Image: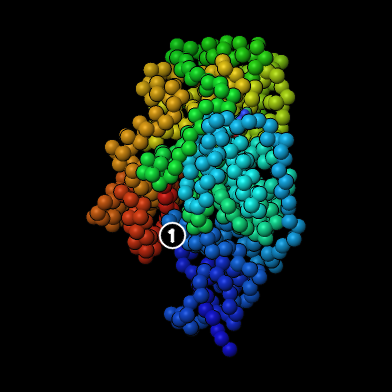
Amino acid sequence: MNIFYYDIAVGLPLRQCFTYQSKFIIKKGTRVIVPFGKKTIVGIVVKKISNPDTLKGLKEIISIADDSPCFDKSSFEAITWAADYYHHPIGEVFFSFIPTLLRKNNNKTLSASNKFSEYQLNEKDKKYKLTEEQSSVLLKLIKVKKFSPSLIYGVTGSGKTEIYLQLAETFIKKNKSILILVPEINLIPQVLKRFKDRFSGEIGIYHSRQTPNQRLKIWQRSKFGEIKIVIGTRSSVLMPLKNLAAIIVDEEHDHSYKQADGFKFSGKDLAIKRAQLENIPVFLGSATPSLQTLKLVKDKKYKKFDLLKRVDGKKPPKLIPLDISDSPLLGGIAIQTMSIIETSINKGEQVLIFINRRGFAPVYECENCGWVAKCSSCDSNLVFHKSKNRLICHKCESVYSVNDSCPDCQSTEINTFGTGTERVEEVLRSTFKKVPIIRMDYDSTRLKGSIEEIYEKTNKSKEAILVGTQMLSKGHDFPKVTLCVILNADGGLLSPEINAVEKIAQQLIQVSGRAGRNNNLAKVVIQTRYPYDENLKQIKTGNYQLVADQCLKINKANAMPPYSSVTILRAISPNPQSCIEFLKKVSSLLDNKKNISIIGPLPSIPLKIKGNLRNHIIIKSHTKSYLNRVLKFLTNEIETWPETKKVKWTYDIDPYDMS
Ligand code: ADP
Ligand code: ZN
Ligand code: ZN
């Protein structure tokens, strides 16, 4: 009888695979049940091996969980690429891309429903003639047949979504499938509606707020070729759609494509890798493309397709810096701003107010002794949430009850300082008593269907004021908005961070894209104490390409990304000394390496989260491939050190924040 040996990845934070034996031939990418310590768990077959190092103690695979592999060849390769590129335990990478129900030993088996969705084009929904720009871009994009990343640089309101729909149409007609990625769950309903209006047939959606059963269903329906269109967030990037024709990455610049914790991958970069492995087109859409993408366009690795005019032919709104140095603020709003808002409301128009902070007030303080409410396990002030009458830590989401008297001096003179969305909402409510004030932030969109409700209420209302965080600035289409107000741009303008200008330019231009989709007189008011700031002057032109070119020049001169490759190595421990010792040892190991520079150890911001202290070093090199090799060497070394046992350490490859 033949015995076969397999390397198996398990869903644990372990960088190695484990060898098991079996009497059966099993394809790689298949789920198997294996004994592991005292448990039996799910593993994924990584490869068949002919000669294990040792046969002693080799355990046997208990059973094969499914009739077919979970991953086809290209997804499998995309995963091994990702585990290597992000230096992340491969089992966890595999598990990130299968539904939770398939990660457990629970008798679930991949199964087809054999209900194949038919797709019919709803011709009536194609109600307008494409603009000249749209037609010419679409014609070129349809001709892209193989792997070749295409940037669709389309100003807000230039009709990018219409291009996606017509691209999808060409693939669906050929009986192929298509994957559409959006950066945030909140953006799904809008895109979903456009696809549902255009195609009859099931459109799958996939994101982390669905139930495990919903996710399993869509994943299986994709795998067995029962559905052909899926819209999802980064976790759907390896959706096992059959006959995949292309991947669309909408709002490609958006940092929400990057996972913030655990396996810190970029959904966008993985989409591009998958497209390369499948040799299919990938379309990246944005009005404010990332510097990384623009550099690759310059290097002729990506092609760029411009949509520079709005479909309605209207000019983009004017960005107007408003000097508030001498103005008292009421709930973050200056008097002049309030009267501009009033004018719009009196005309029966809608206004959008943008503030980058949720809750009522970021500071809850004793007027008598200066005590400030802080989280007991993080290095951060508690934010007062009036609607819940609670103090909440935005770092760990711990909730505290509100003190009526100061814990230090027992004074009852406790006050709140600063402004968040709730305070803005309250001030507007008392000023505009009859106008609907609609808040859109993390707290108001937690519940299922809440985003749809916000759309409905906004579209139904005549005049209305929307108040929201960055969530409101992204891709949403509120056709009646003619005025946008940005309450606190200065934080972004003055930020010392390396990519601060890119970020604030993207944010301001994206916000401005929410205004005046149907109006020539739309404007964006930016409250600032620095109206003559050089960067603001450039951003004010609304010409993103200009700002981006400038940023690229500066980053090139400073050898910063995308002209270099950066990784953050963070160490976390209740004991700060352990972090520093560990990071210093890493620094000294890498110090003599050619073409590597190290900054730090630095305290991370915030220094403390959930009782743990955080420090990091920034590792920089000239190319990604070289840095990858150095990190591989480093990882092997680190894992042998006694110092490593005292800390939790992680890499953030291509970080979005350097703090
Ligand atoms: P973007 O995604 O670039 O911001 P959208 O695709 O959402 O733009 O288009 C903005 C609005 O214009 C949508 O309501 C869409 O239905 C409409 N639209 C798209 N193409 C055309 C066109 N050729 N003529 C008129 N309206 C259009
Ligand atoms: Zn006090
Ligand atoms: Zn906390």
Q: Kindly identify the residue that appears in the image at 71 percent across and 38 percent down.
A: 123
Which quadrant does the N terminus fall into?
A: bottom right
Q: Residue 482 appears at what percent x and percent y?
A: 60, 19
Task: Identify whether 124 is placed above or below 527.
Answer: below
Residue 345 percent coordinates (x, y): 64, 14
Circle 1 packing at 10 Å, graded few (<14), some (14-19), many (20+), is some
Residue 342 shows in the view: yes
Visible residue check, residue 497: no
Residue 530 image point, x, y percent = 40, 19
Name the colour scheme: rainbow
Tell me what residue is drawn at x 33 percent, y 37 percent: 555
Q: With 125 as the anchor, is 235 left or right in this view?
A: left
Residue shown at the point (52%, 37%) measured from the top left: 137
Number of numbered discs overlaid on the protein picture: 1
Towards the viewer: 291 or 604: 291
* Residue nearest the observer in this picture, 284 or 390: 284
Residue sitting nearer the eye, 381 or 26:
26
Where is mark 1, residue-wise? 84
- Quarter of the figure that contains the C terminus: top left
Q: In front: 91, or 4?
A: 4
Whole-percent x and y of residue 55? 48, 83
Is residue 368 placed above or below 582 in the rendered structure? above
Quadrant of ligand 1: it is: top right
